[in-house]
Image (cartoon, helix red, strand yellow):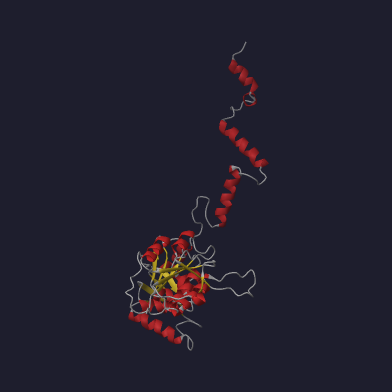
Amino acid sequence: MTDGADDDDDDDPDAARGRPRATHRDARRRREDAREARYDGHGEAPRATRERDGAEDARRRGRTPLGEPRYDRARDRRARGAAPTIAEQLAGEIVYGTNPVLEALRQNRRALFALYVQTGEGGAATRDGKGGSADSEILRLAEARNVTVRRASKHDLNMACDNKPHQGVALDAEALEIPQLEDLPTWDGRGEPPVWLALDEIVDPQNLGAALRSAHFLGVDGVVCCAKNSAPFNATVSKASAGAMEAQVVHQTGVMHRFLAKARDEGWDVVGAAADARAEDVSDFSVRAPTILVMGNEGSGLRTNVRRACNRLVEIPRSPFAASGVDSLNVSVAAGILIHRLVAARRRPS
């Protein structure tokens, strides 16, 4: 009679063949292999498939499976003794385009580190005729501000500006500071009542830049934006504003509806732009008190709490011949129309 261990050995095929008994790790590997064989692309992938896909993704991204770069372009350039790119030399952020660069130099609201001027055909350093006076003014102001001027090829400027239309000039500058605003200024009742613009969660930088351009051109007294959920005040906005972002002091506020409600309680007319049955036709709108025009988000318009903070609503009437699908205006276009009307409608109180 044999003991229980001998009975188990007789039943174990690995022991019968003189091989070590299978471990839990071996069993798990066999299960993984079976899952791999059955995997049809649906559901959670087996570990082996995930590892293989991860290694392939890393290879395509130019990295090893451990995440280390296979090819470091900057390191390779240094090893070859090549000059660093503009992006590698930046101390701040890039500002590009004739008007944004010119206004940044004129207003001197930023710390300025370096001016890059395109050389060769079509470059700002060699251009004659149209644009020549602006280019000369840029170089003159850069010299007056003690800004280092560096020559760069069109290719290098294209890379630094992400292939945006830089017009042959780019400026390395500190990010523009957007001051916080808690209260609107008090009107003393003399002269024309002020008109401000509030931009509530405008997320498209092109729209934000275009609205700032209209506001500055038409002469609003101030602009305030949301500190969160708005497009950042970067080079794209400055370019879209044709440099108005550099000249127009823009403020930000943390909670827009509280800011507007406080302004309303202090005697301001808070006017929301909305297609609403209660909205006044902009053609009949009058301005006899300090007024702040509120423009809502591109897709959703005025938020509920922001609308509640408004004591007046205004709309631009739609043509009866407009196609049914064209039921609204771009927010920057609407802002331009409304600002023009409100600024023109200001009247001295009798």
111, 238: nearer the viewer = 238
Residue 265: x %, y % from top left: 37, 64
**Could you say where residue 199 lies in the image, as x and y percent from the top left?**
45, 67
Which residue sits furthest bottom?
129
Quarter that holds the N terminus:
top right
Asked whether residue 68 appears in the rendered view, the answer is yes
Residue 249 in the image: x percent, y percent? 38, 72
Residue positioned 41% across, 79% down in the render: 347
Foreground: 302 or 297?
302
Q: Is residue 277 left or right of residue 306?
A: right
Identify the residue shown where x is 40% and y is 84%.
137
Residue at horizontal 36%, vertical 81%? 141
Q: Where is residue 338 in the image (x, y as percent from the top left)?
A: 49, 74
- Above or below, 8 against 37 in this view is above
Is residue 126 left or right of 7 when viewed as pictured? left
**Image check: 244 left or right of 324?**
left
In the image, 336 versus 306, the foreground residue is 306
